[in-house]
Amino acid sequence: MGILHEPVLCDHVVALLTPVAPGLVVDATVGLGGHATALLAVGTGIRLLGLDRDPRALELARERLLPFADRIRLVESPFSRVSDVLAELGEEAPCAILADLGCSSLQLDSAERGFSFLADGPLDMRMGATGATAAELVNTADEGELMRILWRYGEERRSRAIARAIVARRRRAPLGSTRDLVQVVIGVLGRGRRGRVHPATRTFQALRIAVNDELGELERFLEPAAEALRPGGRLAVISFHSLEDRIVKHTMRRLEGRCTCPPDLPACSCGARRVLRRLGAKPIRPDEAEVRANPRARSARLRVAERVEEQP
């Protein structure tokens, strides 16, 4: 394959999802097939449906999963369409659904995709092959919209100053590369100290989330995925930053029947109902050994919930 990929929290995923087999497991973000390989290798009667909106990732996943070719089906699709894909394929209710919300090594390590501020490349940031690029966003959005994106999705404290600098820079010439954007951010924040988080980290995260509508995808995924499971089936989600984890946590709580409305509301409006039972109130985090072996795992959080029996 030529691209190394270490799936995060893989032992925990296998330990928590294989007990509900045999049956269909959906890897809704199959990426390069790391989790899928580990699940299929257990050999407990698992069939796997893998989804990804990146056609190149699907090609590589198919190659990696070749030893299990008779038990896999791969579909190009955003993970938010998981229930639609199941219906279109006439598949059975899954015994487990997994979503790993992180970017794959294919995306992060390729300068051509524009995800990394460490290598110069086109300012793209799309996880799939369609839609507007990050270059289009930074060169057309007004200053207020850019500020809101950087603040909401990157929690960037200097969002106003960076947005203003982007607009000033594009008046001279459009931003077309990751280097262009990094230079703008460094011009506002400075280069930072060695060993600290790169000053462009929050800006790149914010633009990537906006370009791919990552939080919207997650919100559209969670409830239909929970409802698609067979009774006793399990939903597992790995998130990598607080914005994602907050959505997963609150949605799982709401689908346990626990109201997530603000306490001052006179009546519940969040639609809380009992669909799931969380397996643990706190997320599972990687241990020190995994973080040493795979530094990208350091911010990962795994939450798992089980589909309850249908109510009469």
Image: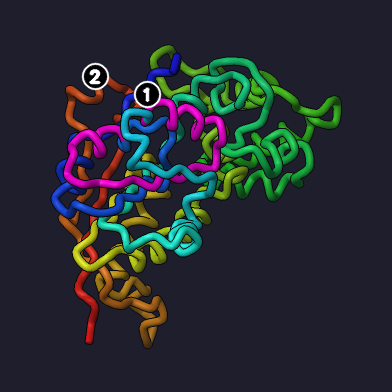
Q: Residue furthest front?
A: 70
Residue 253: image location, x then y, percent: 28, 66
Other-residue count near label 1 (Cα within 10 Å), few / some / many at <14 / 14–19 / ≥20: some
State the residue at coordinates (73%, 45%).
143
Q: For mark 2, does the 10 Å Cα neighbourhood hold few (<14), some (14 to 19), or many (20 or more) residues? A: few
Using the rendered view, name the quadrant where residue 56 is placed: top right
Q: Quadrant of residue 94?
A: bottom left
Residue hosting label 1? 5
Horizontal side, residue 190 vs residue 241: left or right = right
Q: What residue sits 30% from the left and 47% below the top?
A: 47
Q: Amino acid at mark 1?
A: His
Give the residues drawn in magenta, as a range. 37-65
- Mark 2 highlights which residue? 292
Left or right: where 123 falls relative to 235: right
Q: Nearer the viewer, mark 2 or mark 1?
A: 1
**Amino acid type shown at disc 2:** Arg
Q: Position of residue 258 (x, y in %)?
A: 26, 73
63 to 138, vertically: above or below: above
C-alpha gap between disc 2 and disc 1: 15 Å
- Identify the secondary structure beneath mark 2: helix
